[in-house]
Amino acid sequence: MTALCICSPLQIVSPSAPREEAGLYWGYNVRLADGLHDLIHGCPWHGGYDLRIGTSEHGQIVPPGSLALPRFQHVLIAFGGPEGLEAAISHDVRIAGKEPSELFDLYINTCPGQGSRTIRTEEAVLISMAYLQNALACFGSVQG
C-alpha cells in the first residue's frame, strides 16, 4: 500500500499566535526570578500581572467547580516548595514578614488531601493546571 502525504510548508509564528488568531491554548511560560519579590514584580508584560495566584498546601481549599476568578489579561501562578510560599517569603528580605494573602490575589491549595509530605514541582504544575483549567478558561481574557 502506498501513502500520499501532502504537507504544507512550515511557518514560524510568535508564541502568542495560536491563542490570538485561533483562540487555542498554547501552554504557559516559565521564567527564572531572583526571589519571590522579583517573580511578582518582574512581569514581562506592560501593566504587570493583573491576577496573582499562589499555590501551597497551606493555601485555602476551594473546590475547583466553586473557583471564581476575576477577568484578567496576564496571570502569575506561583508554586510553594516543601515549606510553602511562606518560606520563600521569609527568605526574600524585600517582602519578609508579609503574608501570602498580601502578595497574591488568591492563595489556594490545588492538591488538597495529597497524602504525602511533598509533591514535586513538575507534578504540582500539572495538577494545578488541571485544577485551574475551567476557572482560567471562563474568566481569563483571550486578548494578548
Image: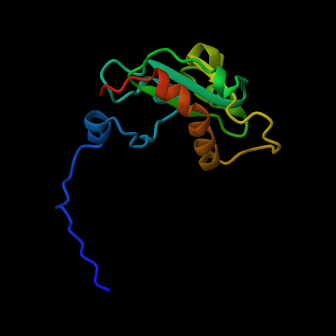
Left or right: where 35 falls relative to 90: left
Q: Residue at x 30, y 22 (%)?
A: 46
Measured as percent of width and height from the top left, residue 71 is found at: 44, 16
Left or right: where 26 falls relative to 22: right
Measured as percent of width and height from the top left, residue 121 is found at: 62, 46
Location of the C terminus by quadrant is: top left
Measured as percent of width and height from the top left, residue 39 is found at: 48, 30
Give the farthest residue toward the right. 115
Q: Quadrant of residue 2?
A: bottom left
Q: Residue at x 29, y 38 (%)?
A: 22
Q: Closest to the observer: 76 or 95? A: 76
Give the farthest residue toward the front. 1
Q: Quadrant of residue 106?
A: top right
Above/below status of 31 relative to 91: below
Location of the N terminus by quadrant is: bottom left
Q: Closest to the observer: 4 or 95? A: 4
Q: Give the number of callouts.
A: 0
Measured as percent of width and height from the top left, residue 76 is found at: 48, 28
Decide if residue 97 is in sight here: no
Q: Residue at x 72, y 40 (%)?
A: 82
